[in-house]
Amino acid sequence: MLKAIKESAAFLQERTNFDPQFGIILGTGLGKLVDEIEIEHSISYKDIPHFPISTVEGHSGRLIFGNLGGKKVITMQGRFHFYEGYTMEEVTFPVRVMKLLGIKNLIVSNASGGVNPDYAIGDLMILNDHINLIPNPLIGNNIPELGPRFPDMSEPYCKDLITKAENIAKNNNISVQKGVYVALTGPTLETPAEYKYMRIIGGDTVGMSTAPEVIVARHMGIPCFAISVITDLGVTGKIQEVSHSEIQKVAAIAEPKLTLIIQNLITCI
């Protein structure tokens, strides 16, 4: 795997000659943050050696190099998921590549289902922890050059970045929640009993991404910040049939607030 990571990074460095400070992963329906980036390079995943190809509607499948908030960023406009049939190494491969390209922080967004009864559709939730129920991406031979065999996960999400984001939200009159994200394999949305279980074990939202990417980032010593858009509810009495297109629509409505927080967070670091 290390050879492939290095080959992808070398290809991108040769094509872009870019020195990024931030990596950004954009989730379902949240790709328009790219409109705020002063784009220098845009490369399709299919053109990058060893990169998977995003197959999910709402994930454009491009790697964007440019400036946002006065900082150099690499942005994944579309991510990869375990349910697409990729291995966990493939799902998290781009995070490894971004590390070799030089990112100092990782910012992740996602659309998720709220299981906290105090949450409403359209809320933003800053992640302060997660419960990973997807196979761990570090299973298998460890590569010491990338990180330790047993990485510490006592602070998966950077407390300093969380505080900065909360202050940005407060200063812009944006209400934000803060809580625990439960990562499942998907692709089915959860049953009422599964939603109840996620709440019992300590979850506030549930989704199909983010935790594996953060685990790999922390393995490599990258501080992480993540934020969810609550696109549907898994709360008893509020559960309704929902489609992927409806999830995309809710995410798109909340996107301007999320974009403002991310852009200002990057500016102040």
Image: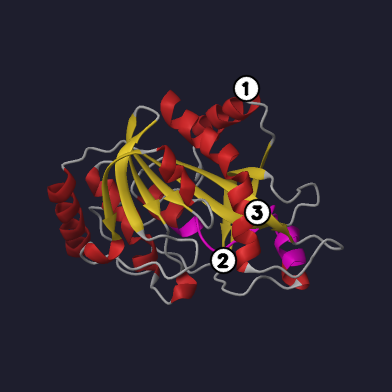
Type of the residue with mark 1 = Asn
Q: Quickly name the residue at label 2.
A: 133
Q: Is residue 7 magenta?
A: no
SS at circle 1: helix
Residue 69: image x %, image y %? 40, 29
- At x 32% / y 53%, what residue is drawn? 63
Q: Which residue is mark 3?
A: 250
Q: Could you give the CA–CA distance between mark 3 and mark 2, rounded to whole angstroms?
A: 25 Å
**Which badge, 2 or 1, comes first in the chain's sequence?**
2
**Among all residues in the image, which is located at the extreme bottom?**
85
Give the foreground label among 2 and 1. 1
Asked whether disc 3 touches disc 2, contact meaning CB atoms under 8 Å apart, the reply is no
Q: Which residue is at 16% across, 59% downward?
A: 7
Q: Of the two numbered discs 3 and 2 on the same chain, state the one appearing first in sequence.
A: 2
Left or right: residue 12 versus residue 71 is left
Query: Which portion, as a residue range, is magenta?
Result: 195-212
Query: Residue at the location (54% across, 53% down)?
Result: 110
Q: Quadrant of residue 234?
A: bottom right
> How many numbered tags mark residues here?
3
Residue 148 seen in render: no
How far apart are the two marked residues, 3 and 1, measured between alpha carbons?
A: 24 Å
Counting other residues with Cα less than 10 Å from the Cα at mark 3, is it few (<14), some (14-19), or many (20 or more)? many
Residue to which mark 1 is pinned? 171
Q: Secondary structure at mark 3?
A: helix
Label 2 residue SS: loop
Inspect the image, locate mark 3, and give the three-letter code of the amino acid beneath it.
Val
Quarter of the picture holding the N terminus: bottom left
How far apart are labels 2 and 1 at the CA level?
Answer: 35 Å
Question: Horizontally, is 140 left or right of 110 in the view?
Answer: left
The numbered dot on residue 66 is none
